[in-house]
């Protein structure tokens, strides 16, 4: 059910207040400067930042460059894959989300000449800037799983909700699997990936559908994770492991999906500790693509070149201020940012106001002093009606927002389901992307 805008502004604001979420209804102080700010990417991070910035920097010249026609609420892909939402429930036209007064260049950036303050687009346009906000999200590298391409996603019953159309195909395949049974192989990937909970959620939702259909006995489920544990935030891990055990879904750790033979339905894995290679036959496969910063981030010298974040060239920014380590007029936030937190839009809700404050400080010639504590949230759907509301900071300490602070958040909650199902999407489109939450 989609609320109309007026209804939402009322209920969303009320929900925001109830949840202790900051709902900005007035204007904060403005900065009188005419800086040129270029925002690369008009996704969750780019639009949120531009909307806030336009209010605070009324004389600034703010440009968003993004080729996309559609703006997706990606957390909804999990709901599509499980048949809870329809394909068209999760997107709005990018044009309708552009903050007023912001210029939209409908093109993709292919290079940033950061020492010259210029971004070059696919069409050959050179966009100059005083300050750059890097928010192009991440790149899904489907072909790093041998035998898979984005175009052939779904062939050989190998599916992924990490793509909009992929989530639609997943739902068809889930229904057939639930009806016919067989061997279900569910896995994630070995790189950092957005919403680490998503591959686990689709596994649990499919298992629940089989139980409800009375066909659970005909199907086996196994969850292969490339990580050394099922979930790496200790407060939530024991209950999640217990749920997998109760539902008879064995977990195999350190398992990296390297390839798929879609003709013979074989999934090829490598054990990341022993190096042992092993093969799993499957009837239904769900996986996540390996992910990295977009190629232009690496080739423009904006990514980490050493340490854990260098392999995928995540943007080399300070984890508290989002200011680039080399180019002090560049900030990065959202999925592209090379910071040790979970890549979620919930994290961006907290990152955007901090990035804007720090950008305004830089524009005013001051030090950026606003600091991010690593907050991220991952509502782990355990069944159609319950969610483990994982909220945590850089230290992996739980930081539940009100009213969850008075509940046992290590367990699945009905109230968190209502939030996930009815509040978060309208809050995303009508508050967060307006720079109001
Ligand atoms: C299956 C799934 C489930 C998820 N579940 C949740 C959840 O439950 N909770 C949660 O909080 N988060 C969830 N997420 C994660 C969340 O959607 C992302 O973290 C968030 O969208 C990242 O925002 P972003 O702005 O960094 O990138 P995006 O929102 O992906 O936007 C990036 C934008 O940049 C543009 N772009 C890309 N390259 C270029 C270029 N070269 N030049 C110009 N523009 C470019 C793209 O067109 C796009 O519009 C989920 C994601 C998936 C896939």
Image (cartoon, rainbow, N blue to C red):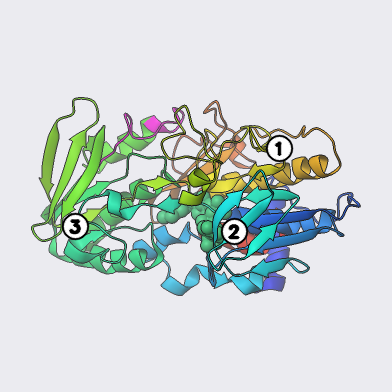
* Real-space CA distance between mark 1 and mark 2, rounded to the nearest whole angstrom: 19 Å
Counting residues from the start of the chain, the first of labels 2 and 3 encountered is: 2
In the rendered structure, which segment of residues is drawn in magenta? 224-237
* Real-space CA distance between mark 2 and mark 3, rounded to the nearest whole angstrom: 42 Å
Disc 1, SS:
loop
Q: Is residue 355 visible?
A: yes
* Real-space CA distance between mark 1 and mark 3, rounded to the nearest whole angstrom: 48 Å
| Residue 234 magenta | yes
Residue sitting at x 40%, y 58% = 78
Disc 2, SS:
strand
Using the image as rendered, state which of residue 277 and residue 108 is in the foreground: 108
Q: Is residue 374 above or below residue 217?
A: above
Q: Residues within 10 Å of mark 3 (few under 14, many from 20)?
A: many
Q: Is residue 105 left or right of residue 150?
A: right
Q: Residues within 10 Å of mark 2 (few under 14, many from 20)?
A: some
Q: Is residue 403 left or right of residue 311?
A: right
**Residue 310: x percent and y percent?**
45, 34
Q: Is residue 236 above or below residue 158?
A: above
| Residue 334 magenta | no
Q: Is residue 417 visible?
A: no
Residue assigned mark 3: 284
Counting residues from the start of the chain, the first of labels 1 and 2 encountered is: 2
Residue assigned mark 2: 120
Residue sitting at x 78%, y 53% = 24
Residue assigned mark 1: 328
Residue sitting at x 39%, y 65% = 80
**Residue 67: x percent and y percent?**
55, 67
Task: Look at the numbered discs 1 and 2 and tell me whether their residues touch, using CB distance below 8 Å.
Answer: no
Counting residues from the start of the chain, the first of labels 1 and 3 encountered is: 3
Q: Is residue 408 above or below residue 290?
A: above
* Closer to the eye: label 2 or 3: 2
């Amino acid at each position: 059910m989609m609320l109309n805008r007026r209804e939402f502004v009322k209920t969303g604001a009320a929900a925001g207040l109830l949840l202790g979420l900051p709902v900005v209804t007035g204007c904060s102080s403005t900065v009188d400067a005419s800086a040129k700010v270029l925002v690369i990417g008009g996704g969750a991070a780019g639009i949120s930042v531009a909307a806030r910035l336009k209010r605070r920097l009324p004389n600034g010249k703010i440009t968003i460059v993004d080729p996309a026609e559609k703006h997706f609420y990606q957390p909804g892909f999990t709901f599509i894959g499980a048949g809870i939402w329809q394909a068209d429930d999760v997107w709005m036209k990018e044009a309708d989300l552009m903050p007023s007064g912001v210029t939209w260049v409908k093109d993709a950036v292919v290079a940033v000449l950061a020492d010259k303050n210029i971004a070059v687009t696919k069409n050959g346009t050179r966009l100059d800037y005083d300050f750059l906000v890097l928010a192009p999200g991440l790149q899904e590298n489907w072909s790093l799983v041998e035998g898979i391409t984005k175009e052939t996603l779904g062939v050989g019953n190998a599916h992924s909700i990490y793509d909009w159309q992929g989530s639609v195909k997943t739902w068809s395949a889930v229904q057939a699997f639930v009806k016919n049974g067989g061997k279900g192989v569910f896995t994630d990937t070995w790189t950092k990936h957005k919403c680490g909970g998503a591959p686990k959620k689709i596994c649990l939702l499919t298992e629940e559908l089989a139980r409800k259909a009375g066909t659970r006995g005909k199907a086996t489920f196994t969850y292969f994770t490339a990580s050394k544990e099922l979930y790496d935030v200790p407060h939530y891990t024991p209950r999640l492991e217990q749920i997998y055990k109760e539902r008879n879904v064995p977990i195999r750790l350190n398992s990296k999906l390297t390839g798929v033979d879609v003709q013979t339905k074989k999934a090829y894995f490598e054990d990341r500790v022993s190096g042992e290679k092993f093969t799993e036959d499957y009837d239904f496969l769900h996986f996540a693509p390996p992910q990295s910063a977009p190629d232009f981030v690496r080739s423009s010298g904006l990514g980490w070149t050493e340490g854990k974040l260098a392999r995928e060239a995540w943007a080399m920014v300070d984890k508290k201020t989002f200011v680039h380590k080399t180019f002090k007029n560049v900030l990065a936030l959202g999925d592209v940012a090379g910071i040790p937190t979970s890549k979620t839009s919930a994290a961006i809700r907290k990152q955007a106001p901090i990035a804007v404050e720090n950008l305004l400080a830089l524009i005013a010639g001051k030090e950026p002093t606003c600091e991010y504590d690593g907050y991220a949230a991952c509502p782990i759907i355990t069944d159609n009606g319950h969610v483990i509301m994982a909220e945590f900071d850089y230290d992996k300490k739980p930081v539940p927002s009100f009213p969850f602070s008075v509940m046992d958040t290590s367990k699945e909650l009905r109230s968190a389901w209502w939030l996930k199902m009815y509040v978060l999407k309208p809050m995303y489109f009508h508050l967060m992307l307006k720079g109001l939450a």
